[in-house]
Amino acid sequence: MDGLLWEDVEDLFDAEVMGALPDVGVPDTSARDWQSLLDLVVERGWRHRYSEDSVVTAPPSAEAVLSRLAGSGRPELRVWPTDDVLAIFRFMSPEEIDFDVDLRELRGQERLDVFCDFLCAIGRRLGKPVLMGSEGGVDYDHPALGFDVTADGVVRMASRDPQR
């Protein structure tokens, strides 16, 4: 467990506020970071499925996927850190690792712990922040929460809404 309490962040998991599929991202990445992510998925034994244009194939190297982005279909990697929590990674560019999560799957302390462990694993492997923002793109200057490298854990980054 990371130590983040559901009661302290429950408002950040409200689909009315964040959108049902908030974006999570790692800024300032490279093909090497993408490859580290692919390796981490395999090492952790997380169930996963890679596809391009909905055709399921074995995941190629990150360099292979990223080098053909302009002409290729829509590559995505679906990763299940547990059977009931899914993260969908989209290979948009080498400079950012971008993925979505479904807030409906992240309700309560147990699921929050799974999510935090997942973000921590990625952040520690890459040595970079992993930040969650509202659906439509992470504002890296104002994320809601994320893995903080210095704190070595997931922390709330958004201020509390005084109306709640």
Image (tube, helix red, strand yellow):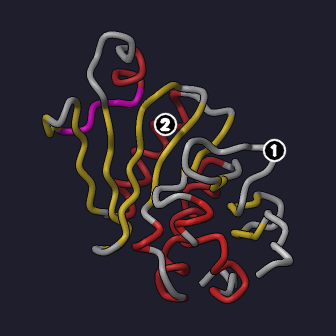
On the image, the x and y values in percent for residue 77 come to 32, 44
Residue at (81%, 44%) from the top-left corner?
141
Considering the numbered disc 1 on the image, is that residue within a helix, a strand or a loop? loop
Q: Is residue 115 left or right of residue 85?
A: right
- In-front residue for pair 127/28: 28
Give the magenta part as a residue range.
Answer: 58-62
Residue at image x 62%, y 33%? 29
Of 117 and 91, the residue lying toward us: 91
Question: Within 10 Å of the Cα at label 2, are there few (<14), some (14-19), or many (20+) other Cα atoms?
Answer: many
Q: Residue drawn 51% across and 66% down?
A: 118
Residue 39, compared with residue 121, is above or below; it is above
The amino acid beneath tag 2 is Trp
Placement of 2 over or under 34, stated as above or below? below
Provide the residue designation for mark 1: 141
Residue holding disc 2: 34
Could you give the CA–CA distance between mark 1 and mark 2, rounded to whole angstroms?
A: 22 Å
Q: Earlier in the sequence, mark 1 or mark 2?
A: 2
Q: Amino acid at mark 1?
A: Asp
Name the spot of residue 72 as percent of width and height, x first: 28, 17
Q: Among all residues in the image, which is located at the extreme front?
A: 163
